[in-house]
Image (spheres, rainbow, N blue to C red):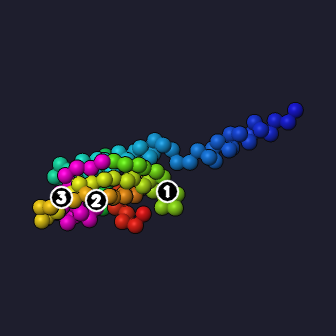
Amino acid sequence: MNRWWLFAVPLVCVAGCGFPAAKVDEAKGHVKAALDKWQAGGKADELKAAAPPIEFNEGMWNAGEKLVSFEMGTAKYVDAAQAVRCEVKLTVRGKNGKTRAENATYDVTLGPPVKVVNNVMP
């Protein structure tokens, strides 16, 4: 009896499983933690003391703009970038006091340290 399929099926499953969903969820959680800190009026440098440490690169935050609200969108692993890409809808108040909607895409690499970067050209 030919039993080659006993070895082929597990190999196909391993090859097709991809990046673990738990890691995608973990990356999404890091983005949420960083955005929660921004929305609460914290400083990006405070995230470096988190466990695990998070390096969050967001130009709007660095420029002194305020995060009014955010809505997490989809997250998926992007092999070409070797990162989890998270989409987020932001409501930001600029220094001029005007509120505007922004769509942001964050690339997350799991560390340590965890790195979250606003990818303006996803």
Residue 14 picture quarter: top right
Of marks 3 and 1, which one's residue comes earlier in the chain?
A: 1
Q: Could one spot residue 40 in this view of the protein?
A: yes
Query: Residue 78 shows which numbered tag?
Result: 1
Left or right of 71? Residue 109 is right
CA separation, marks 2 and 1? Answer: 22 Å
- Residue shown at the point (48%, 43%) measured from the top left: 21
- The residue drawn where x is 28% and y is 61% is 58
Q: Amino acid at mark 2?
A: Glu
Q: Image point 52% across, 61% down: which residue?
A: 80
Q: Which residue is mark 2?
A: 102
The quarter of the picture where the N terminus appears is: top right
Tell me the quadrant of the picture where the C terminus can be found.
bottom left
Q: CA distance from mark 3 to mark 2?
A: 10 Å
In three-dimensional space, the C-alpha distance between marks 3 and 1, rounded to whole angstroms, equals 31 Å
Foreground: disc 3 or disc 1: 3
Q: Nearer the viewer, residue 41 or 102?
A: 102
**Label 2 SS:** strand
Type of residue at label 1? Val
Instruction: Indicate the amino acid at tag 3.
Output: Thr
Between 47 and 25, the residue placed more toward the observer is 25
Q: Position of residue 75 (x, y in %)?
A: 42, 49
The residue singled out by tag 3 in the image is 99
The structure residue drawn at horizontal position 33% and vertical position 53%, both measured from the top left corner, is 88
| Horizontal side, residue 44 vs residue 16: left or right | left
Can you tell which quarter of the image residue 55 is in?
bottom left
| Mark sitting on residue 57 | none
Give the magenta part as a residue range. 58-71
Position of 76 relative to 8 (above/below) = below
